[in-house]
Image (cartoon, coloured by chain):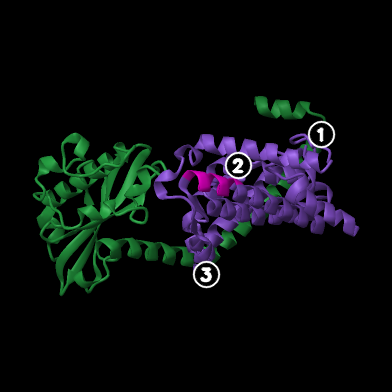
Amino acid sequence: MANSDYKTIVKDGLWDNNGVFSMLLGMCPTMAMTTSATNGFGMGLATAVVMAASSYLVAVFRNRITTEVRIPVYILIVAAMVTVVDLGMNAWMHELYKVLGLFIPLIVSNCLPLARLEAFAAKQSPLPAFLDGLFMGLGFTIALTVIGAVREIIGSGTLFADASLLLGPSFKAIELRLLPADMGVLMMILPPGGFIVTGLLVVGKRLLDLAAGKEIQMAGAHAL
Amino acid sequence: MTTSQTVSDVPAASQAKMFKHGVILGLFCLGFGLLLAITDAVTIDDIGARAIEDKQNSLSQVLPDDLHDNNPVTDTLSMTNAEGKELTVFRARKNGKVTGVAYEIFGTGYAGEIKLMMGIDATGKLLGVRVLAHKETPGLGDKIEAKKGPWIERFTGLSLGNPPLERWKVKKDGGDFDQFAGATITPRGVMAAIRGGLEFFAENQSTLTKAD
């Protein structure tokens, strides 16, 4: 593959065809996990690992998976990767697991990995498929972190609270309190806040794209 | 049999195809099943060790270290609580004598069950209460967690007679304990759980503190 294609994979994943802001996929973990920037970041990273691994595996086996059984095989692969991440994190990254553990199984219900397997990995060789999974996952991480940050600042008045639990004690410094504790607008941490913030950020991204003279991609059209 | 008739109606070519797809799907299941079995075997010891550490951490908050010279995590007693639920009691001992016990108590909050760990000394005085798991509203009901606020510390040192039983309620219900602004159901559920836990101790004091 030419270098420009890799560039497209990176740009598509992080911005142009962002899983959340452009394709509006994976709304279940997006709403559930973005009550704080730290939670969104952790969930995004776990998803990125699962996506990169399952995209790679699907590309490796793409000539063996017949069209008729591809969907169950994809789900099998995603579910297996989720379980491996779940067990591995529980055993070796236990502090992180205590924060995210409940939400790792949610990755199976995320349609973003499945969409990328179907739209990309099934037709590509392993390396580009791996990169697509990884950068789509990182784009997802960016989206969840940004949504989480907005909801956390308005909802609880903090930013990156508990980041040291996730990333280690040296990250204590990025845990900020921006507003007094009782100033938080509770609704932002509750589900309606998730929809409102996500909606406004989708609008914001499209306005930026318009200003940059880019063609607006319709939700999901590129993916499926 | 109807199923075999249906299958034999299908032309041989597509039967072979169906068989092929079945084999492919089966092989993938086998392969990834094997991968999961290996992952499980590799992680099972570490996960078990982490679970014991977690239990130790939550127990050490409700059973102070200077109260015991044994390991309460492994010194357990199985009992049945008033609701018929199986309960594991962790015992703290010094020189073989039971100095305190800890067990899980359950309350009903705004969004389902609240699970707590309660430590109580041999005379029935509360050593501490900690929330283990809950689904209360973040920012409102979650102030029952020790890391979100000091509310739960309020119970340390109290017992069934101090304050008297009828005052073991939130202020809104005529008791002694603060509720939170915007959340009464959560503290009410926690209060009920603690009261239940204290009553459980009072009813079973001799069994719980018996030095067998």
Q: Nearer the viewer, mark 3 or mark 2?
A: 3
- Is residue A92 in view? no
Instruction: Give the amino acid at mark 1.
Output: Ser
**Disc 2 target residue:** A109
SS at mark 2 in the image = helix
Using the image, name the chain to which the residue with label 3 belongs: A
**Disc 3 target residue:** A170
Say left or right for B15 vs B183: right
**Disc 1 target residue:** B14
Chain identifier matching the green colour in the rendered picture: B
- Is residue A119 in view? yes
Point out the stretch of residues depicted in magenta.
A147-155
Using the image, name the chain to which the residue with label 1 belongs: B
Q: Residue lying farthest right?
A: A2
Find chain A in the image and tell me its colour: purple
State the separation of the CA atoms marked 3 and 2. 33 Å
Using the image, name the chain to which the residue with label 2 belongs: A
Residue A178 versus residue B136 in the image, above or below: below
Instruction: Give the amino acid at mark 3.
Output: Ser
Q: Earlier in the sequence, mark 3 or mark 2?
A: 2
- Name which residue lies at 38% across and 66% down: B53
